[in-house]
Structure formats: C-alpha cells, structure tokens
Amino acid sequence: MSSNQIAAIENGTAYYYEDVDEPVRHEGRIEIYAHYIRLCGGPTTTWVPREKVQQVMEI
C-alpha cells in the first residue's frame, strides 16, 4: 500500500457519478486516497474524485 493510500479493497463495488444522473458501477480492486478513489482492473485505471463517489463496498 502506498503511503498516500488510505485503504485497498481487492474485491469491491463502487458507485460513482460521471456526467449523468445515474451512478456508474465498478466491480474489482478499489484503492482509496484522501481526495480520490482509484478503480483498477479492466482495460484502464480510473481516478474518481471522492466528491463524485456515492458508495464503496467490500464484497
């Protein structure tokens, strides 16, 4: 775990908002930082500002 990382969830679900009213769902590894969450797995890694995150759960 990085020194800036608060937590890492190996198998989790995150709901976050992009530019639409409905939340987007991510399943997989999630890394939580002070101001962002990092969604890992799949073809790319996505950084999401924490104010756009609705919910993070560990499966």
Image: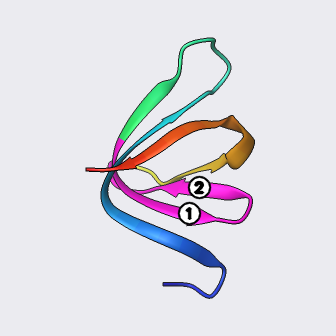
Q: For residue 20, which quarter of the picture?
A: top right
User: Dot 1: few (<14), some (14–19), or many (≥20) neighbours within 10 Å?
Assistant: some
Mark 2 highlights which residue? 37
Task: Find residue 5 and report its image quarter.
Answer: bottom right
Q: Position of residue 53 (x, y in %)?
A: 61, 39
Residue that numbered label 1 is attached to: 32
Q: Is residue 22 above or below residue 40?
A: above
- Is residue 33 found left or right of 25 in the rendered image? right
Whether pointer 1 and pointer 2 mark residues with C-beta atoms closer than 8 Å, the reply is yes
Q: Is residue 51 above or below residue 5?
A: above
At 41% from the left and 31% from the top, the residue drawn is 25
30 is within the stretch colored magenta: yes
Where residue 24 appears, as percent x and y from the top left, is 48, 26
Query: How was the colour assigned to the protein in this rendering?
Result: rainbow
Q: x, y percentage for residue 19?
A: 68, 20
Query: 57 above or below 30?
Result: above
Q: Residue 1: give its label.
A: none
**Residue 35 forms part of the magenta stretch:** yes
Q: Residue at x 61, y 27 (%)?
A: 17
Span shown in magenta = 27-43
Label 2 is placed on what type of residue?
Answer: Ile
